Amino acid sequence: MKFSRLRLLGFKSFVEPGEFVIERGLTGIVGPNGCGKSNLVEALRWVMGESSYKNMRASGMDDVIFSGSGARPARNTAEVTLFLDNSDRTAPAAFNDADELQVSRRIEREAGSLYRINGKEARAKDVQLLFADQSTGARSPSMVGQGRIGELIQAKPQARRALLEEAAGISGLHTRRHEAELRLKAAEQNLERLDDV
């Protein structure tokens, strides 16, 4: 499953409908200050289930809706649709019958968000799990926001390693290993007590 296109309407600075093709491989978003680079990354995070308005550089979730400008009135809704190429059939079983998946999120002022997967209403949790099953999501380390590169350069080696492990999908293995070691230690202690009896 790969990102293929991103469609935006009324999301932050994208008042007019816009569609961006996401090519296979590494994708970088470049352009002059103020052209909407960070808003594109935030649109990806938002459609994948981001629930923290602070992570969206907003004071409330309604702030993702275009708020108007001198030349344009404010919008009442915003919608982002992410198209996923599923020709390799790696989507979870419930969604694996099509070559392309569409995940969309629409927000109406003071009414909240509505998610859809292939046109059918879905819960935020369903969308988040769809992406988690693919080792990505709203907080994926594979999406590097503005200023994050500088943080990574300045980071201590241990922090860099943790980020790489998370990106490689092995950070969860460390957690499971630690839990298994704790269970093993508890079992060994139980055996020692049994020997004492």
Image (tube, rainbow, N blue to C red):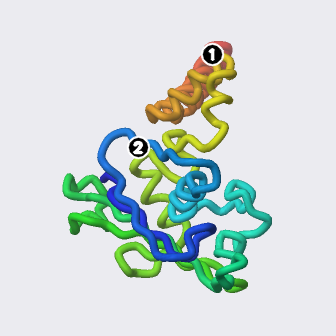
Bin the neighbour count of mark 1 within 10 Å (Cα to Cα): few under 14, some 14-19, many 20 and up: few
Q: Is residue 169 left or right of residue 97?
A: right
Name the residue type under label 2: Thr
In depth, the one of 176 and 193 nearer the eye is 176
Q: Is residue 48 left or right of residue 185?
A: left
Where does the C terminus fall, quadrant-wise? top right
In depth, the one of 61 and 161 nearer the eye is 61
Name the residue type under label 1: Pro
Count of number-bearing discs: 2
Q: Residue at x 27, y 53 (%)?
A: 90
Q: Residue at x 64, y 24 (%)?
A: 159
Looking at the rendering, which quadrant does residue 25 occupy? Answer: top left
Q: Is residue 8 visible?
A: yes
Q: Residue at x 32, y 67 (%)?
A: 101
126 vs 192: above or below: below
Looking at the rendering, which quadrant does residue 13 occupy? Answer: bottom right
In depth, the one of 110 and 189 nearer the eye is 110
Q: Secondary structure at mark 1?
A: helix
In depth, the one of 125 and 9 nearer the eye is 9
Residue 88, percent across and down? Answer: 20, 52
**Farthest front residue in view:** 71
Looking at the rendering, which quadrant does residue 158 occupy? Answer: top right
The mark lying in front, picked from 2 and 1, is 2
Q: Is residue 129 left or right of residue 197?
A: left
167 vs 16: above or below: above
Q: Give the numbered dot on residue 122.
A: none
Q: How far separated are the C-alphas under marks 2 and 1? A: 25 Å
User: In this figure, which residue is indicated by the disc labeled 2?
Assistant: 27
User: In this figure, which residue is indicated by the disc labeled 1?
Assistant: 157
Residue 29, percent across and down? Answer: 48, 46
